Image (cartoon, helix red, strand yellow):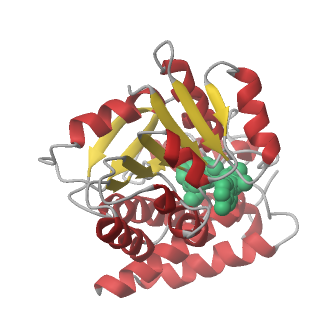
Amino acid sequence: LPLAMGFVGLGAMGKPMATNLAKALPAGAHLYVHDIVAAAVDELHALFPTIVVECGSAREVAQNADVVLTMLPEGAHVKSVYLNPSTGIMAALNQTSTKLLIDSSTIDTATNLHIRSQLATHSPGTSFYDAPVSGGVLGAERATVAFFAGASPSDPTLPRLTCLLQPMGSKTIPCGGASLGLAAKLSNNYLSGLITIATSEAMDMGMRAGIRADVLASVFKAGTAQNTICDVFNPVPGVCAAAPSSHGYVGGFRVQLMRKDIGLAVALARHVGARNVLGAAGLGVYAAASEAEDCRDRDSRVVYRYLGGKEH
Ligand code: NAD
């Protein structure tokens, strides 16, 4: 790992990822960090006072670090962190810079490609990759997230990218080229978001017909409906003891984030000319659940509750 690394965006995912990165840095190395929430930066600094260096802007991070990771909520935040003329990362670069920049946020592919082309013009020696993650906050804490990299398997930078991400995750999958890590992530969340709705409806139907929830879950597991949402994150409270559904849907993957990702996936489908008959219905469910008071801010599997599923 290089002696000067940077991290911008220390939220639910970014903080544990930056923590794992700080732990892996060699002696004498520094991690330059920035977040608009000062408390997030202070907290990380308190954990690693000799390693973490607090910066007032993304620009300052990029001035000091050779490799910068970003983990931000949405496309607009990512755009401003990279391209803002006074505070952004690009403002720290020039024609001869050779930095490596990695964005792990889940955003639209168009914003990613726009940033990439702006950087390529301004600083041709700088590399920019999309590498969104799957695995949630728990995965970020345990360093088991998977990175979906916007890189071809033959990209000469891929081994370095994989090595840099390794302290934060269990694997890096090259998805083919620029912005395709994002396309992969959106395809993944489209599928898992819709499986959640289908699992919720199927569980509720079987239970209302008189089958016990745990019996139904074992039927799906033994049958062709087997899926991780059913086995590990079952939306019905009490089926999986460790799942957010068994703890009031607290923790996990926020329903508003699933709404954002399905929305981005539906837009991607339109952009590439892919049919998705289930997308609009799924988006409607997540949008409404995001607004409902007993569902908002809870784990996305709360759609079971939103759909009127039996909870006892
Ligand atoms: P979060 O809202 O908890 O954290 C985002 C952080 O970015 C916050 O600390 C915020 O203050 C900071 N930020 C916002 N604008 C900034 C700016 N201009 N400059 C500096 N910092 C700024 O979000 P999160 O849950 O960590 O998610 C981050 C991304 O990862 C999202 O795109 C999300 O979809 C994706 N993701 C989240 C999960 C999850 O389970 N939470 C899982 C996989 C992927």
Residue at the left extreme?
154
190 and 29: which is toward the camera: 29
Residue 264 vertical position relative to residue 120 in the rendered view, above or below: below
Q: Is residue 93 visible?
A: yes
Q: Name the quadrant containing residue 304.
A: bottom right
The quadrant in which residue 308 appears is bottom right
| Residue drawn 51% across the image and 40% down it | 64
Specify the quarter for ligand 1.
Answer: bottom right
As drawn, 188 above or below 248: below
Is residue 167 or residue 115 the one in the foreground? 115
User: Residue 165: percent from the left, percent from the top?
Assistant: 40, 35
Q: Position of residue 50 (x, y in %)?
A: 65, 18
Residue 75 lies, in percent from the top left, at: 54, 70
> At x 64% / y 28%, what residue is drawn?
52
**Number of marks in picture:** 0
Q: Nearer the viewer, residue 204 or 60?
A: 60
Q: Nearer the viewer, residue 108 or 161?
A: 161
Tell me which residue sits at (34%, 54%) in the image: 129
- The residue positioned 34% from the left and 56% from the top of the image is 128
Looking at this view, name the residue that lies furthest to the right.
293
